[in-house]
Image (cartoon, helix red, strand yellow):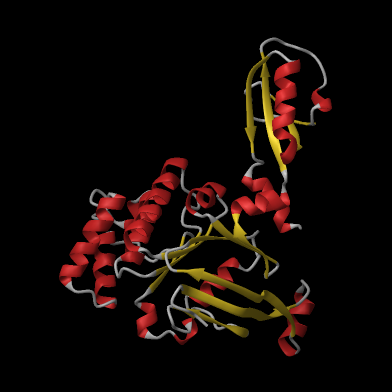
Amino acid sequence: MSTARETIAVDSLSKTYHVPEREGGFGSAVRSFFRRRYRDVQAVHEVNFRIGQGEIVGFLGPNGAGKTTTLKMLAGLLHPSAGRADVLGFTPWERKRGYLQSMTLVMGQRNRLAWDIPAADSFLLNQAVYRIGDADYRRTLAELDDLLELAPIMRKPVRNLSLGERMKCELAAGLLHRPQVLFLDEPTIGLDITAQARIRSFLQEYNRRTGATILLTSHYMADVTALCERIIIIHHGQLKYDGAISDLTRRIAPFKLIAVALRDETPGDLSRYGTPLPNENGDGKRLIQVPAGEAATITARLLSDLPVHDLTIEDPPIEDVIERAFHE
């Protein structure tokens, strides 16, 4: 179980759902009323990982991979079918008061704020639920206001807030009791680029100020690359990878992308330098894929052989690396 350095310890955690099933049509509906058939759906299967205090870890996988189910078990909303977990010294699904006061679960697709009243009133309700003293409440709210710029929007009914404004208030509501562990499920989903960047900046600064541990799911790789040095990948309920993003790139996609802009319309086939790829950036550069260990040598050849105006060397897009990892 957990040690002094571990905030989250997960051992062989599994969750299986017993799901009813039937074919379409009235006859099948009538038959299922008398004899219902079930099948087992394994959402999470023997997942193991450890997360230390203050880490921000990306928890990635395609839709239906088991990410949200895992977060719900760690937040105490679901009981596992097998395995165990320790978060801050607690077993999450026992839902002890000390644990509930030490963690939060924020889901971008779920609303915790009352729809018809201002967010400020929902904040006061959370103050009462978590029994936060007035002085602590005012101090924490002031810090969150400083980070999220809440003052202009707190008095508006939640239904009148934009999605980005509502997400700010959702995060604030989940952090008023100063949790030590944050489980964040798609906290930037549906937000525009500016709002996503603000939420990411807030999470970075909150982690820096409080030392909170954050386990984050997101389909936006910009969230992951900006916040996380380490990622955990889950697919079909099973752990596929746990480690640094840079290590995954070296293992899954050991190549570089060289983009070349020439000083004139020099014709010719660049395939002798690497594998030509389509360039969708619209910048007029030619793109080739080369083995990572040969990038320097091939770059020197390009500069020597061709009238190069501009040249860049990049790692493959993280989206492509993650997609490869899903199917490895």
| Residue nearer the viewer, 239 or 189 | 239
Q: How many marks?
A: 0
Residue 111 image position (x, y, % from top left): 42, 63
Residue 175 image position (x, y, % from top left): 33, 65
Give the residue displayed 55% in from the left and 58% down from the top: 230
Of all residues, the one furthest to the bottom in this rendering is 34
Residue 309 image position (x, y, % from top left): 63, 16
Give the residue displayed 24% in from the left and 48% down from the top: 152
In the displayed structure, does residue 219 sit left or right of residue 288?
left
In the displayed structure, does residue 140 sit left or right of residue 3?
left
Would you say residue 287 is visible in this rendering?
Answer: no
Dividing the picture into quarters, in which one does residue 33 lie?
A: bottom right
Of all residues, the one furthest to the top in this rendering is 264
Give the residue displayed 80% in from the left and 23% down from the top: 270
Give the residue displayed 32% in from the left and 58% down from the top: 209
Position of the C terminus, as image quadrant, is bottom right
In the displayed structure, does residue 70 sit left or right of residue 269?
left
| Residue nearer the viewer, 222 or 160 | 222
| Residue nearer the viewer, 221 or 21 | 221
Residue 86 image position (x, y, % from top left): 50, 80
In the displayed structure, does residue 273 sit left or right of residue 260?
right
Dividing the picture into quarters, in which one does residue 36 lie?
A: bottom right
Dividing the picture into quarters, in which one does residue 180 lie?
A: bottom left
With respect to residue 137, does 306 lie above or below? Answer: above
With respect to residue 209, does 262 lie above or below? Answer: above
With respect to residue 90, does 203 lie above or below? Answer: above
Would you say residue 204 is visible in this rendering?
Answer: yes
